[in-house]
Amino acid sequence: MFNKKKKEEEPITENQAEQEVQDTQAGETQTEDKVTEPVAALSAEEKLQQENAALNDKYLRLFAEFDNYKRRTQKERIELLQTAGKDVVVSLLPVLDDFERAIKATENATEVSAIREGILLVQAKLKSILSQKGLKEIESIHTVFDTDKHEAITNIPAPSDDLKGKVVDELEKGYTLNDKVIRFAKVVVGA
């Protein structure tokens, strides 16, 4: 019925009909493109923003991890430099102990003053060299017992009340290297 009115009003040629169909199809695709373009653009933009946020987060975490790594390695390097000669110093400690024992043994000898003087000079020289490298003796006698510096061998009754809980005698000296304990002092504590 609709077609009859059109035919009566104006006859349509075959070319015109094809043109109208093409025009309407083109109009439909244009409107679909206009509708889908913003949706597609928004989703692509959102994806890019999410990727950007993920990459920024990854970058910040990696930067923080690298910064922590730098601090840790710098701290380890400083500790290594401060205690680089620890093995050498620890191996020399028994020699130092032997010198002290030799000095004690020569105190009662009659004509060994020259030997004693020689041993004292060697000991002084060795202590000087070790102190230049950062070695220090831990003062123990009549100090409060400290587990960070002392190793208690035994407890004995304190000779006086003021020596209770304090070091009464020192069997083996303790040493620090650059303020780090490398050998605990072996002591007797008053009880």
Image (cartoon, rainbow, N blue to C red):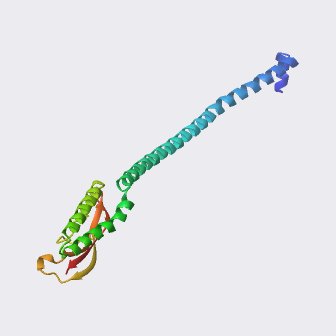
Is residue 61 positioned above or below 15 on the image?
A: below
Q: Residue at x 29, y 66 (%)?
A: 96
Q: Is residue 139 left or right of residue 18?
A: left
Q: Residue at x 21, y 83 (%)?
A: 156
Q: Is residue 50 left or right of residue 67?
A: right
Single out the residue that lies furthest toward the top.
Answer: 10
Residue 12 seen anywhere in this rendered image of the structure: no
Front residue (pair 22, 98): 98
Is residue 141 positioned above or below 69 on the image?
A: below
Which quadrant would the C terminus be assigned to in this image? bottom left
Instruction: Report the label total.
Output: 0
Is residue 92 positioned above or below 2 on the image?
A: below
Q: Residue at x 22, y 77 (%)?
A: 189
Which quadrant would the N terminus be assigned to in this image? top right
Front residue (pair 49, 1): 49
**Residue 63 rendering spot, x and y as whole percentages:** 46, 44
